[in-house]
Every structure is written in structure tokens, then in C-alpha cells.
Amino acid sequence: MNNYIYIFLFIIISLIFSILPQIFGYLLSNNEDNKQKKNSYECGCDIFSKINTKFKINYYIIAILFIIFDIENLFFFTWGNIRNFLNIYKYFSIIFFLLEILIIIFYILNKKIFNL
């Protein structure tokens, strides 16, 4: 039980350090409402276009593809670190994953998704 007192103290101190600045910020801030606070902010300039502009779907597709290939790179780094511990099952799972990625890349290039 004596060892847990340090964990309890750590939790209490971290709560104090995270809650006290928020309380002080709320008490010391200026809470008056005015026109400038309620106005939407756009780089200090007046609003010059509609807020609800539509984007092409290709931008979202490219963002999703970027996330997918970023996660793929995480797999490559982990496989690079464990290359000495691979058995035949792990080796073929890597090959299968690489084939899937190649099929996806060729599909993307064939559909010309990157042409905006």
C-alpha cells in the first residue's frame, strides 16, 4: 500500500496542475461580449466569400490515400526491424501485403484519381 501513495500523489498533483490554470484563466479573463468577439475571423480581413464553398471529392480521396500509405510505411519500418526473426508464414504475409498494395496502386493509376 505504501508504494501506491506515490501514484496517488502523482495523480493529485497532475490534476492540480491541469485544473488550476483553467480556473485562473476563467476568473482573470474579460468575459464581456462585444461585436468583435462574435464576428467570424478570417485573417483580420472582412469576409469576402461564402462560408459554404464546395470542394472536389478528389481532394478527400487523396487525403484518405495519403493516410493509407502512411500506415503502410509504419508496417515497412516494423518489418525492417524484425527481418532477422521472420519465419515462412510471416515472410509470405509480407509478400501478400506488398501485392495488395501494388494492386491498389495500379488501380489508382488506372482510374486516374490523381488527375484533378
Image (tube, rainbow, N blue to C red):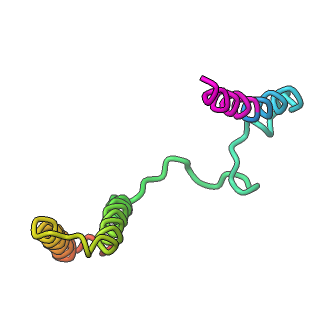
Residue in view at x 20 percent, y 70 percent: 86
Residue in view at x 17 percent, y 75 percent: 102
**89 w.r.t. 3: above or below:** below
> Is 112 covered by the magenta stretch?
no
Query: Which sits in the foreground, 104 or 30?
Result: 104
> Is 8 covered by the magenta stretch?
yes
The image quadrant of residue 7 is top right
Query: Which sits in the foreground, 97 or 13?
Result: 13
Question: In the rendering, at what x and y percent does residue 109 appear?
Answer: 21, 76
Dominant secondary-structure state across the stretch colored magenta: helix
Question: In the rendering, at what x and y percent does residue 71 appear?
Answer: 34, 62
Q: Which quarter of the rendering shows the C terminus?
A: bottom left
Residue 38 can be seen in this image: yes
Residue 107 can be seen in this image: no
Residue in view at x 26 percent, y 70 percent: 113
Q: How many marks?
A: 0
**71 w.r.t. 32: above or below:** below
Stretch of the chain drawn in magenta = 1-16
Query: Which sits in the foreground, 48 or 22?
Result: 22
The image quadrant of residue 62 is bottom left
Residue in view at x 68 percent, y 43 percent: 40
The image quadrant of residue 20 is top right
Question: In the rendering, at what x and y percent does residue 61 appear?
Answer: 32, 61
Q: Residue furthest top?
A: 1
Query: Which sits in the foreground, 51 or 2?
Result: 2
> Viewed as shown, does residue 104 lie left or right of 57?
left
Q: Which quarter of the rendering shows the N terminus?
A: top right
